[in-house]
Structures are given as C-alpha cells and as structure tokens.
Amino acid sequence: MALTGPLTLMLAIALAVVMPVAAMAAWNRGRSDSRRATHVRWIRRGALMIGTQLSAVVLVAVMINDANKFYTSWLELLGEHHTVGTTVALPGSQDAAVQTKLDNARAQGRGIVVTLKVPGTRSGVGTFDALVYLPVQYGQPEYAHRSFPVVELIAGSPGTPQTWTDSLDVARILDREIAAGRSEPFIAVMPSQDVAGGRDTQCVNIPRGPQVETYLTNDVRATITRAYRASTQNDAWAIMGYSSGGFCATNLAMRHPDLFAAAVSVAGYARPAHDHQTGELFAHNIALRNQNTPIWRASNLPPPDIALLLMATAQDPGTDRDAAALAAAARYPLSVTRLSLRHGGHNFEVWRAEEPTAFAWLSTHLVPPLAPAPTIDKTYPVVISSSQ
C-alpha cells in the first residue's frame, strides 16, 4: 500500500472513526471489582485512549503528507537515502595518440597543436583537416578526468587553419594567457571553412550547394567531442572569427544558441557579403538571406540567449558601423559587448593584439574544465528545451 493516495487516506479516516467507537463500546467491559480486574480495566482504558489519540494524529499526519508529498513511500518515511554517484570524463579517442607529445610539451609549460581529420558526416561536404590546440592542462594528471571547454576559431576568406597558428600565433598567445591566469584552459579547434573549392561561402548552407553551416556546427562538434575530452554542454562552447570569419562566428552563434554560449567577431560584418567571391548564396531567397543576417535577426526575431563581443577599429569603418548597429539592435537576453579601437586597419597585426582580450572575455562566458556532474539515483538531468 502506498504512503500517499486515496486508499491510505480512507484507511486513516476509518481508523480515526473506529477507535473512539471502540473505546466507548469497551470502556465499561469487565465489571468485576477484584484488584486484578480493576488493573486490567485501567490498562485497557489507557490503551483505548492512547489508540484514539494516535488515530487522530495519524489522520492529521496522513492528510498533511498527502497534500504536500513530504514522504511518498514507506521506505522514504523509514529513512531511505538517495544515492549520489560520481562519474569522470572518459578518455577521448585521440588521447593515447597525443599523450607522448603532451608529456614533452608539459615539461616546457606549453600546449600542443595537432592535426585532426573532420569528416562531413552530416553535411556531406567531404573530409577536411582541422588543427586542434590542447592546453598544457590537458596532459596534466589532475585534469585527466575533466572535460574542457572549446573555442572554435574560424578563419577569414581566403584563409586556412594554419592562418591561426602562423599569422595569428594563437598557440603561443594562448599558452601565455593561460599561464598568466587571464584565460581558462580550453581546447581551440581550427576547422577548414574553405570546403567549397575556394568559394567564399560565408559559412552558410547554400541551397543545392555545400552545407558549410552544418559542417562547422554539427560535424566539427561531433568529431571534437569524440576525439578529445571536450565538453558537450552549450555553455562550454564558443566561436570566434576574424574578417569574414567574424561574420561566420556571429551568424552561427545567433542561429545556434543551443550549441554556443558566446561568440567573438574580430573585424567582422553583421551582414553576409555578396560579391564575385561569394556568388549568390541564398538562391535569391530574401527570407533565407534575412535569416543569415545578424542585424536583421536582432531586430526582427526573438533574441537568442548568447553573448557577443564585437571588436573593430574606427579606421575600419564598415566593421565598426556594423558593430554599433548590431549593439543598438540587441535586446535581452542577447548580450553585446563592443571594443572599438581608434587606430588600426583590417590586418593581422591588429587582430593579434586583440586576441588576448578576446580570450579573456570568452573565459568569463565559458565553464572551466570540469569533471562530469554527479548522478542522483543513477539519473542525469534531461534537457527538455533550449533557447531559440
């Protein structure tokens, strides 16, 4: 019999009614005046009084518990405890392959950059090489069972993953900023955004053409979370890009708040480009172009729950104007932070100087490397809905 429910309540009511009736019926039983009979009579009357009082207390307790569900089972009432189980992040499929390199780099206090093939499993665009930066902490024993936040770095067009490691010196800058405590240790993945034979796709899914958006979101994420101890939480993923890659970062984050918590646009625009390098990206579909225009989305659609950092310079007026316009159009819960420098053009020297600020800002919006959350009664929280 359950501790709550109509059956238990009806039995408690019946007991509360029967006990007083039984007490009245049995109160004067046994009329013998012998000392033994008198003792028995008083013991019986005492038991009936206690039973009557207890039945009333039980009824009140059952009614209160039934209304508030303090205890829902007899085991819980008798002291059953919930079990809390701890789990650890399982090794990624590539952990063993990079361990020696991690050990050697750890002695020098730096992270490593490795090459990883990212297949277009869902997008169908093919398989392309990505570069992956693993921070020094990734190889340290105390982090062995933690999952790491991830920043996806999108190059401009033309550009390759190597642009980040060569022209933008990202590994050295991250080593320095992480060691100084200004940046969280995170995995940085630099995928190939040029997956359409040199065409500037602006990282969108082209109708009847390359599905670049799907590749840079679903395919990259699936590969990285399998290969390394990368978190699968959306508040542990961010995206950052420069020039056209800055547009990509803003657009993809606003379109996928279920995948990214934050984005940084370094000298990026708030509108997709349309020139001889892009061709017609949206099959002349105005609605589709609007949906891939961050400033239009901010003004016309429910705002996504993400944070944006827009970095530009006054001497790069197009990107600065777009940053100001997007910031003005933003509505809660979309959060926009701006950094506008007085001097500097559309070039790598400016962007290198901005990287430490960008990584420090991202670190305030991403969860740090954590072990997986514990279970309770072998049960995990289940995501029912997400920001749209």
Image (cartoon, grey):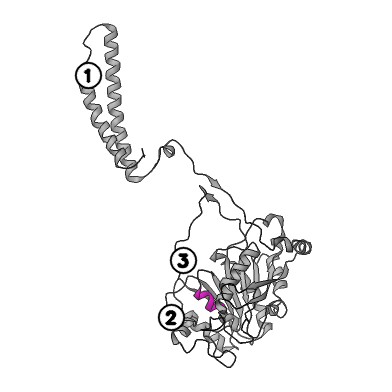
Q: Which residue is mark 3?
A: 386
Q: Which residue is mark 1?
A: 27
Q: Residue at x 62, y 53 (%)?
A: 88
Image coordinates for residue 10, horizontal then vertical, percent: 27, 37
* Mark toward the start of the polypeptide (1 vs 2): 1
> Which numbered circle lies on residue 299?
2
Among the 4 quarters of the image, the one containing residue 137:
bottom right
Task: Reply above or below: 380 against 45.
Answer: below
Q: Magenta segment, which residues?
A: 249-260
* Mark toward the start of the polypeptide (3 vs 1): 1
Between the C-alphas of marks 3 and 2, the distance is 21 Å
Task: Say whether residue 258 is magenta.
Answer: yes
Q: Relative to residue 161, is residue 32 drawn left or right?
A: left
Please tell me whether mark 2 sits on a helix, a strand or a loop.
helix
Q: Residue at x 67, y 72 (%)?
A: 117
* Mark toward the start of the polypeptide (3 vs 2): 2
